[in-house]
Image (cartoon, grey):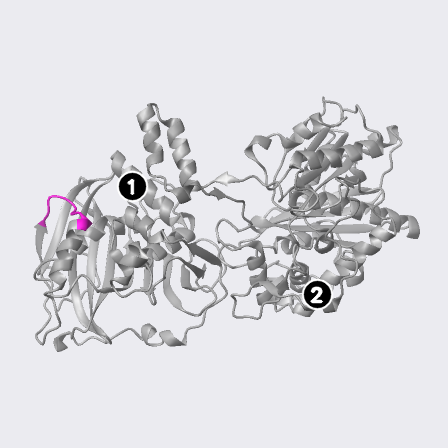
Amino acid sequence: MATTPAPRDIPRDAVIVGGNRIPFSRAGKKYVRASNQDMFTAALEGLVARFGLQGERLGEVVGGAVLKHSRDFNLIRECVLGSSLSAQTPAYDLQQACATGLEAAIAVTNKIRLGQIESAVAGGTDTVSDAPIAVGEKLRLALLAANHAKTTGARVQSFLTLRPKDLAPASPSTSEPRTGLSMGEHQAITTAKWGVSREAQDEVAFNSHRNLAAAWDSGFFDDLVTPFKGLTRDDNLRADTSLEKLATLKPVFGTRLPEPATMTAGNSTPLTDGASAVLFASREWAAERDLPVLARFVDAETAAVDFVHGHEGLLMAPVHAVPRLLGRNGLTLEDIDFFEIHEAFASTVLTTLAAWEDKEYCRTELGLDEAFGTVDRSRLNVNGSSLAAGHPFAATGGRIIATAAKLVAAKAAETGRPARALISVCAAGGLGATALIESA
Amino acid sequence: MTQRTGPGTPASYAVVDLPGLPGLGSLYAKGAAGSLTKRPGTGAITLPTVAYRVTGIATGDTATSAHLDAYCRVVGEPSSDVLPAGFLHVLAFPLATAVMVRGDFPLPLLGMVHLRNHVRVTRPVRVGDTLEVRAWAEDVRPHRRGVQVDLVAEVSVEGPDGPGLAWRGVSTYLAKGFRAPAAAGTAAEPAASESRDDWSPPLPTGRWSLGGGTGRAYGAVSGDRNPIHLSALSAKAFGFPRAIAHGMYTSARALAEVGPARRGETYEWTVEFFKPVLLPGTVDVAIRRDGGRPGPGGGYVYDGWRSGKGTRHFTGTVAPLA
């Protein structure tokens, strides 16, 4: 029997104090002239202001961006230097595609739990509007050859093989490097395999918009969001959308598959700009500063799947991670009060739920004796998720953690019993990160 | 006719040493000229019982290393000191072509259709090894649309105990309109090819967006600058609507996408070609484990078809040798 992680005597808790983000904005709109650094600094400054951290030396600030220019090698440290935190606050960049924000939280909470640091900020930022543009591969190789050349003649020689079309820039792409398929095309294949219907996907999208709109209207985000560039709400949110409207949209992914295409711009997440940050601490550090404690960051599990040759769907890694995470903590799906499953696509949520209900799949792929279980849909993404809010890749983790922490805190206050949230984020590369949080 | 499955030059063949690997450019010129005189007749089709051999081929020089890097970049092989099977095909291909342009080779070089390819790597060839390459033609036999013939090439690593066989490739070509000698008496075609119309594409695992320059890029690293691959204009002269991708490019790319970690150091690599890939074009591929779960030890099957259509381009296998 292979050695597997088991609960240990954790030295102490890492708690979530609160979060802050800027409203998420569809690519090419309000934030066209905002850089990753601008956006993360704004989210961080909002967090600093909210909790009075001016001049504070935090243990660490960790985050990243998925689409990052090479000049932003120390992006998060630069943001710290541009913030009103103490310049003595260390920082580092981390990148795990769409799981960047959650992985940053896992990293800092582990340090807090080990007693290496007392406080930390984790988060992320991404801009599609201000994405780095690279030169084409042939021009890049010619430039490198010229750079390595020792004589002018050799330098000139490097460029002689170039044709005019080689000068065209290469834009970042969301295609998987090893398959050439975009994330949407990959998910369309998974959708076809699991036979998820168009109607079910549109319903997930509809609920996301309805729930997020209700959360905004109820003031849920009042202490979670700082306005930026004149934007005060997520501008992808369509409070007036309807199942009828969603049903009129043409499929955009999976149109070349033999099965009917079901994924539309309405039930897929749009490209988005935004940034988020979450403040974590030891209980002692928070108490010393009279800061609130919303929840405890209990445990986390990451997973990866073999998608390259079609054995598993690209975005199915969280399906594998969650049973390990809950199993290790002696929990089942029924013990979870809030499911925060990142809506990369509506069908990602649905294939995740379908897989957990499939006995054969759970036995052969997850190594379980039975089906993992059923998610109570009334506990799923209750305040909306990425379909409505948008998904600035690295910023999504921070958005979800802050929402989940506030939800469990409120639930525990209301019922007098502990409340738990499960966070699940799928990512490019067949990756997934999941986490368990519990009311403090 | 000779009918064998094992390695080695047929005993009845004369081995003729060439001073070095010939250049493909001049071979094509000769082959084009010779093709005009090689027309279907009524008599028996007799292959030359000659094997060409080139010895002492160095692979440790800078030129080979640059060639290898360029090849790997085009087909997507990771940079390595082990020569991929597709690179060895490229190395041996001119010698096989030299056999086909001989005056006594009965079929015309131009217009021959590459039907399938079967390669076995029985030991890894590394940069720095000194190689011997042999090539000959064998087993001419009937095909539904003409005759097919095998061009066999072998690459051996020279060592103190003589050359050791490392790579064996069998390329099967169709010459349309020719009639095979009745004496051959073999089945006209494998059963798999008879049912080619029944095929429907599986779910893809990948998508290849092939630019208009794909044929030129593979032509540059393979030396195979057959005009049908280079441009729409030159391809039209040979009856194709646009340039077509080299079959061996598609097959080498599938081999690369299975990758060294999964195919191991010794492996079998096969491909069967159907409709050509027109350039530019998008090919959907399914490259997946042969009937099972992932992990070391098993083989892979691959299929390629026109994206969004059922037009089948190729199918093949990559399997580690036990």
Residue B246 visible in the snapshot: no
Circle 2 sits on which residue? A246
Disc 1 secondary structure class: helix
Picture quadrant of residue A356:
bottom right
Range of magenta residues: B17-25
Horizontal arrangement in the rendering, residue B39 relative to residue A213 (left or right): left
Residue type at tag 2: Leu
| Quarter of the C terminus of chain A within the rendering | top right
Q: Which mark is residue B67?
A: 1
Label 2 to label 1, Cα distance in Å? 54 Å
Q: Is residue B162 above or below residue A374?
A: above
Residue A89 picture location, percent across and down: 72, 25
Chain letter, disc 1 residue: B
Disc 2 secondary structure class: helix
Chain letter, disc 2 residue: A
Q: Is residue A103 above or below residue B110?
A: above
Residue A281 picture location, percent across and down: 79, 34
Residue A92 picture location, percent across and down: 64, 31
Local packing at callout 1 (Cα closer than 10 Å; few below 14, some 14-19, many 20+) is some
Is B18 within the magenta? yes
Residue B313 picture location, percent across and down: 37, 65
User: Which of B25/A176 is in front?
Assistant: B25
Asked if disc 2 and disc 1 are in contact, CB closer than 8 Å, the reply is no
- The secondary structure that dominates the magenta segment is loop
Picture quadrant of residue A118:
top right
Q: Identify the residue shown where x is 79% and y is 25%.
A: A56
Residue type at tag 1: His
Horizontal arrangement in the rendering, residue A406 relative to residue B205 (left or right): right
Name the front one of labels 2 and 1.
2
